[in-house]
Amino acid sequence: MAALVPVSLLLAAILVSGCQKVDGAKIAEVDDQAILASDLQKYAGRELSVQRENLYKLEKQKLEDYISAFLLTQEAKKRGVSVETVLNQEVNSKILPAGDDEIEAFYKLNKARIAVDLDKVREQIRGYLHNQKIEAQKALFLKSLRSKAKVVTYLKPPPVFRAELSVAGEPFKGSEKAAVTIVKFEDFQCPFCKTVQPTFVELLKRYDGKVRLVHKDLPLDSLHPKARQAAEAARCADEQGKFWNYHDKLYANSPKAGVDDLKSYAKDVGLDVAGFDRCLAGGKYKAVVERDLQEGAQLGLTGTPTFFINGREISGAQPLEAFAALIDEELARSR
């Protein structure tokens, strides 16, 4: 067991980690010009937020480890024995060796990854399963100790980072006055962007009137060279009031996004094809797509899809409930 850290030092570390400079605080000067904490937050808020969250997770885990070690030490004192003896009595002595049936079941479940005959790894699997049982039994014992003690923790998570995003003039679905705005940065040729689309159909139904979905473009030219033109085509469709019809058509047929494909989709969704062709050929919305791309770059985005729920970032094709959890938090906050 690791040596216990004095409580005074632990509390000091917790208090220090919880200190954040308020937005109006002056943190530097250059030629008598003040630089405020809010300036740094605008410049590097996302990166700083990630590091603060990582530190918080580490502190939280170490605090839990400390509490567990403290409770074990106290229990050993009550019994007049060592911590090792307590663990032998309550954990090790209650574990049965892994049987052949357990080993074979584990091997069958993981055969593709193990890729060698069972006889060659039988004892390794036995040891692994035995260690898993010990950890599970130890967790149960620590839970029982904790249930008998009065444990209060004061470690606070860092402030939630909210990106400042411009949504003026961007295509959206849902109520313009919704309490929750989801901004999605996507690439029409990205397979993960395509995968997540049904999630938003469901979310708009579940939170009818409470959620607004805003589209932004983040074409990844190095991976999907036709994505930028597809984004411009969708903006041309938006000019005729059919952005979302065209948006859905692009994803339904992704990754096909050649010029002929884009023109075909325009006809399929009922656009004035001649007007659409002029818009696309003239590059009318190049600057709009580039603006979104530059905003994504300033936010440090390097992949799609990336979403912001009232400014709170969530990346990748996450399951519906991952979005719902954040939406529920934001709705509760708005109330």
Image: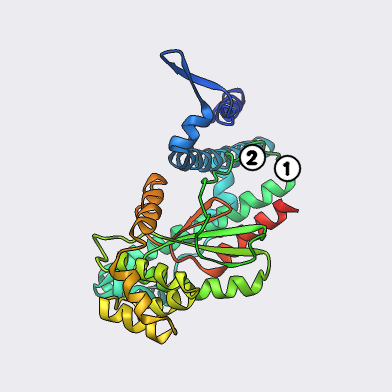
Q: Residue at x 37, y 62 (%)?
A: 285
Q: Secondary structure at mark 1?
A: loop
Q: Earlier in the sequence, mark 2 or mark 1?
A: 2
Task: Give left or right: position of 85 versus 301.
Answer: right
Q: Residues within 10 Å of mark 1 (few under 14, many from 20)?
A: few
Q: Position of residue 250 (x, y in %)?
A: 38, 77
| Res 80 visible | no
Specify the quadrant of the image occupied by residue 207: bottom right
Q: Residue at x 44, y 35 (%)?
A: 43
Mark 1: amino acid: Ala
Q: Secondary structure at mark 2?
A: helix
Task: Identify the residue position indicated by label 1 in the image.
Answer: 149
Specify the quadrant of the image occupied by residue 277: bottom left
Q: Position of residue 326 (x, y in %)?
A: 60, 58
Please tell me which residue lies in front, 16 or 210: 210
Residues under labels 2 and 1: Cα distance? Answer: 8 Å
The reply to whether callout 2 and callout 1 are in contact (CB within 8 Å) is: yes
Q: Is residue 285 above or below residue 163?
A: below
Specify the quadrant of the image occupied by residue 298: top left
Instruction: Find residue 17 and name its label.
Output: none
Q: Residue at x 74, y 41 (%)?
A: 150
Task: Give left or right: position of 294 versus 199.
Answer: left
Q: Is residue 34 above or below residue 219?
A: above
| Res 54 visible | yes
Please tell me which residue lies in front, 102 or 250: 250
Q: Position of residue 58 (x, y in %)?
A: 49, 40
Mark 2: amino acid: Leu
Q: Position of residue 232 (x, y in %)?
A: 35, 66
Instruction: Find residue 71 and name its label.
Output: 2
Please tell me which residue lies in front, 222 or 230: 230
